[in-house]
Image (spheres, rainbow, N blue to C red):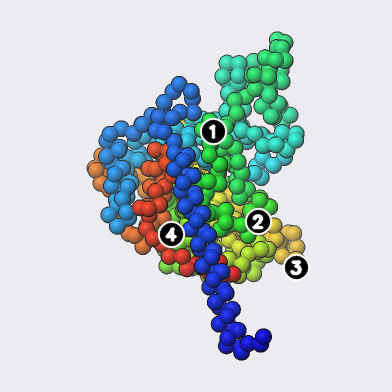
Amino acid sequence: SSKSPGLSSAYSRCLQDLCVAMNIARRAMMQVHRRALWHACRIPRTLSTIPGMELPVLSEKLEELARPTKRRIEEAKVLHPAFYTDQSYAQIERERLFGMNWFAAAHVHEVSQPGDVKVVEVGKTSIILTRDKNYKLHAFYNSCRHRGARVCSSSTKGCKQLVCPYHWWAYRLDGSLKATPPAAMPKERKEDLGLLRVPGLETFAGIVFLNQLPNPPPLRDCLGDLPEKLKRYDLDDMELFSTKNYDIGGDWKLIAENFVDFYHIDAVHPELSRFSRVDDHMPYQGDGQYVGFVTSPLTDCGGPGDSIKFGQFARLREVESKSALFFHIFPNISVTIYPHSVYTLLTLPSKTPGRTEEQLTLLMAPEARKSDVSEDEHQERCSALFDFVTSVNDEDVGAIENLQIGLTNLEGQGMHGEFLPKYDWPVHRFQNMVLSGLDGDALNEEFMPKLGNTFEQKVLSG
């Protein structure tokens, strides 16, 4: 039957509101399911990745210093300086956080072809990533099965086999033992002497994640609703443009906290603040082991990242095509997603407490090159964007290293910093993920602040 324009418009709005409400209800059901999974996957405090051994636990002093942070943000205090400067704690953290949780190890692009080998150093633990002749990805501990010598000292391309430099034991890229020259070893013994495999290996958003637990829970159980938020971004199909490596004189947690701290933009990043103002940031947060927020709408200001210079991910909704997304995936990778590109900061604690190895990576959307732009001009635009991103990160490195110096000065003073709830909720969330992770737990969402979901509602409404 025919309807008047007014009734038709009202009917359309009603249907739209109903769809949004159904999406919100479905996500709420999914959140309940994820919480149940996290609870079931809780890791005992004494569990170790090495049979017969127990992981170190926090001292009573550090347990006491952690308590003021394990509160709702209105009453909580910033994590005590000892958690960034104490050397005995740094070892506990490496073994418990990186030994009991999924962590980012590399980009898939770095090990995309047969013969690609990537060496990943996590504190005192060394891991080898390989891509074998069948295009299968593997992760092994970087120790020979003969006497335990380090097998690989650096990453490489076009590798045919992994050879231990001590006695020339050779391994295929699938980790199986190939030869033990000059001795001949029976085939049945070789089958049991392959490189020790890292138990958990999965990929998400073009990133390789590892887990050292014997039977780790699925990675997506930890990510919560993040895969849903990113489903229209073709992150597995991006093109790697360039990387830059940093050796930073600051704890890895400070780098993560700096990424989620948009409150510092005006003070540290004068150029960035021209189009990414502090009060333009809003939450984009659900349940999951991540911190998420967004800047919307983006503002073109004549800079290298302006929207007119690149094509966008093809499947974005209108509001996503005008927004920048920021996600820190616990514990160690920060992801900035523009409509045309992505840059990441992957951090790993070094052997020296208070120092961090960081890799900045810029990747372009599959459709980033515009049809009327030559390849040379496109490369120039990408180079200008990379230069801008690295200059912003260079500013952050200076701020982080200065913060590490200040925290070291306060180590014995018993001082906790203060949270400003409006701006510091992302730092509070991350710090509580750290403290929960030390116990093998996911974050307790019940103690996190209730945040606005204005941007998410716009995305759901199309």
* CA separation in Å, label 2 and label 1: 29 Å
In the drawing, does residue 191 fall left or right of residue 286? right
Tell us which disc is closer to us: 3 or 2.
Answer: 2
Q: Residues within 10 Å of mark 1 (few under 14, many from 20)?
A: few
* CA separation in Å, label 4 and label 2: 26 Å
Q: Which residue is mark 1?
A: 215
Q: Quick one: label 1 or label 4, which is nearer the N terminus?
A: 1
* Residue at 35%, 53% in the rendered image: 447
- Percent x, y for residue 266? 42, 63
Give whichever of 42, 11 is nearer the camera.
11
- Secondary structure category for the residue under label 4: helix
Give whichever of 378, 75 is nearer the camera.
75
* Residue at 57%, 20% in the rendered image: 149
Q: Look at label 3 and name its amino acid.
A: Asp
Q: Which residue is mark 2?
A: 234
- Percent x, y for residue 334? 51, 50
Q: Look at label 4 and name its amino acid.
A: Phe
